[in-house]
Each structure stands twice: as C-alpha cells, then as structure tokens.
Image (cartoon, rainbow, N blue to C red):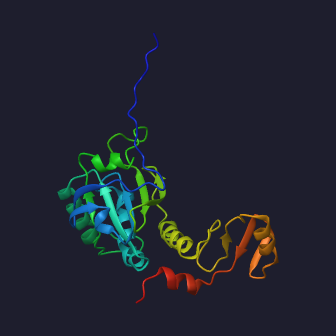
Amino acid sequence: MEQIQEQEIISMPRIGDAAPEFKAVTTQGDINFPSDYAGDWVILFSHPADFTPVCTSEFMTFASMENKFAEANCKLVGLSIDGLYSHIAWLRTIKEKIEYKGMKNVEVNFPLIEDITMDVAKKYGMIQPNEDSTKAVRAVFFIDPKGIIRAIIYYPLSLGRNFDELYRVIIALQTADAFEVATPADWYPGDDVIIGPAGSCGTAKDRMEDSDIDCKDWFFCTKKLDKDLVLSKVLKKK
C-alpha cells in the first residue's frame, strides 16, 4: 500500500478577510490586535529571526520611515518567533552599533511581537514548512481601519523587502478608497488612474464622449488625478 505522507495544513488568511485576532507581548507592551489599531491602517510584518543581517537592514529601514508611514495614517507592527529579551537586545544593538546606508543610531519605536509559540505566525500563515519550519517568512499584511486585510505580500527568507513598494501600496489603497478608482501598473500619485468598467452600453458611450476621461476602448478608461489632491486626502494634515 502506498504510504501517504501527511503534511501540516497551512492556514492563510486572504484578502478581504477580517485580520485574525490575537493578544501578544511586544517590545512596546501588550497589544490586542487588531482592536487596538481600530481607525488606523496597519502593516503587520514578520521576519525570520533576530540578529540576522537582512532583518537588521529591514528594521532600520522601517524605523527610519516610521514617521512617513504615520503621516499616511499607517502604523507598523513587527513579529518574530524569538523571545522578548532577544528582541530588546537586538534592537539595542541596532541603535548602538549598526550603520547601514547612512542610517545610524536608529531606534525602533514600533512594537515587535514575541511569538515563541508561533501561535500568531501560524494564524497568519507566516510559517512556510517548505521554506523553514521554525522561522517565519517575510510576510506583509496591509490591514485597513476596519480590521480587514486589503493586501498581502510574501517574500522568502533570502529576499529583503522593497520599502518604496510597501509605502506605494499604502498610498494606492487609500487613493482607491477615497476616489473610487483603481491604480494601474507602477502607479504613483500624480499618474492617471483607472475608471472601473462601464456597467451598461449607455455608460460606456458617455465615457467615450467625456473629455475628462481618456478611453482607449470601452473597457480601458483613465483620468487624471492631481497629485496634490491625492496627497491632501491621504496624508495627515500637519
């Protein structure tokens, strides 16, 4: 009889799902997620281990961009399956000893979750057994103010994240919500946006004749959206 090897089923929340709830100890105190972040966008991200070079470069970059994300109504929450004291020692080492791409004396002020039991990592599908059964991959969850997962990006252990892209996603998601549009490939504020497909022949005809809308065909229509208008809607007023 052929033997069937049982594999652990990986539970992975999907786009549109409510973010799985959990309580956790972090470097900034206890949190109740996502209820503590109601009303804010959140990037919840995992990393494989403390005291590793790729993760160090990522944490320094996130910390250096924290104010920029905050201006875009977005808070940061990190996760590792290492313990709290390891987290604290690693973050202290980053501040006191590490310099990278001109960043130095970097202090990480956003919470880093202790997840020794891997309970949170498993809830979010951050443990990928074929990659590593004891380390979390570089998962990124974009969670909206209502606690709904809006985008997910996964990176392998060997690949550091592109932080310009993470910021672009936060801006694009909020732009889509605020103006009821979609954003095309490589979109940045100031670029044309996509108008959703017409629901009727009459609407399609009206769009083709609208001077403010550029239609290459009935299904592919764009319009200009001023950069300052986008940023005035998305970024917090100073």
Residue projecting furthest to the left: 85
Q: Is residue 33 above or below residue 74?
A: above
Residue pictured at 43% horizontal, 38% vertical: 130
Residue projecting furthest to the bottom: 238
Screen quadrant of the C terminus? bottom left
Screen quadrant of the N terminus? top left
Where does the image place residue 150, in percent across and percent down from the top left? Answer: 48, 61
Number of residue marks = 0
Question: Between 61 and 41, which is closer to the camera in this rendering?
Answer: 41
Residue pictured at 45% horizontal, 49% vertical: 156
User: Quarter of the image holding residue 148?
Assistant: bottom left
Question: Between 159 and 125, which is closer to the camera in this rendering?
Answer: 125
Residue pictured at 26% horizontal, 71% vertical: 95
Where does the image place residue 21, in percent across and percent down from the top left? Answer: 31, 55
Q: Is residue 194 above or below residue 119?
A: below
Where does the image place residue 166, in percent across and percent down from the top left? Answer: 48, 66
User: Quarter of the image holding residue 7?
Assistant: top left
Residue pictured at 38% horizontal, 62% vertical: 147
Question: Between 32 and 207, which is closer to the camera in this rendering?
Answer: 207
Q: Is residue 25 above or below residue 95?
A: above
Where does the image place residue 88, in percent across and percent down from the top left? Answer: 20, 63
